[in-house]
Image (spheres, grey):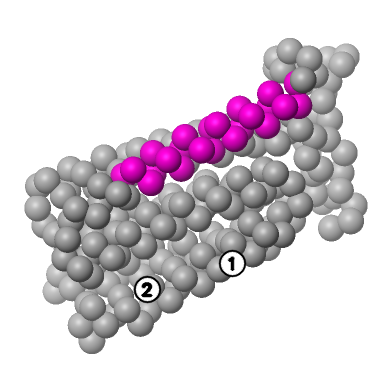
Amino acid sequence: MSLYDYFNWIIIPILGLSVILVFIRFLKGPSLPDRVIALDMLILISVCIIAIYSIQTNQSTFLDVAMLFALIAFLSTSAYAFYLEQRQRK
Amino acid sequence: MKDILIMILASFGAIFILSSSIGLLRKPDVYLRISVTAKASTLGIGLMLTSAALYFNDYSVTTRIVAIILFVFLTISIGGHLLARAAYFTKTPIWKGTKVDDLAGQYDEVTHELYSEKHNSSIKPEKDTSI
């Protein structure tokens, strides 16, 4: 089994299943912090998918996008935490 | 040989990410969910990016990947802490099976300051009995 087939038939379906599970939590989440942490997790899984995709297409330029996604994940999480805390304070 | 190593690293990373997403779906409480995400997914992302670094085997790519891994290791835990603190301040209910809440009665409600002794006007989220 070549690397391409292994990624195509095993790794990508596992990552897709985990995206679906996290998205169920994103839709269900009883409170706002649940949704924020699910969104953070979705972005982090997409970083992994970008890494696998860059291996498959043999293009290392996609890893720049992965770095950008990691930055955006931290920025959005901290901004949402700040917003939640300030909204409570009035 | 290199392909087999890449496969092993990528499979372990995918398994860790799958387990952390199952934990995110199954855990009964916001705080437990944040804890699951901050630990297991960090290791999964690190293994997955290491497999990409092994595949390309190039200095420029490896430095980029080391930068991503360091950044992710630093920021997932900081973001989880910030979010759990915000969830505690907004009085998100705790799971009914929680035995010890060390922060109970130690955050000031107005100034959001942490006191080491018991405080009068403090935040205390109630337990959620519906779960």
Extent of the magenta region: A67-89
Q: Secondary structure at mark 2?
A: helix
B37 horizontally vs B131: left or right: left
Q: Identify residue for label 1.
A: A21
| Relative to B46, residue B21 above or below | below
How many angstroms separate mark 2 from mark 1 (CA)? Answer: 16 Å
Residue B103 visible to an observer of this rendering: no
* Image quadrant in which the C terminus of chain B is located: bottom right
Crowdedness of circle 2 by 10 Å Cα count: few (<14), some, many (20+)? Answer: many
A49 horizontally vs B16: left or right: left
| Relative to A47, residue A52 above or below | below
Amino acid identity at mark 1 = Leu
Q: Identify residue for label 2.
A: A11
| Relative to B19, residue A36 above or below | above
Residue B78 in magenta?
no
Crowdedness of circle 1 by 10 Å Cα count: few (<14), some, many (20+)? Answer: many
Give coordinates of residue B96: x percent, y percent. 85, 50
Q: What chain letter is assigned to the residue under label 1?
A: A
Amino acid identity at mark 2 = Ile
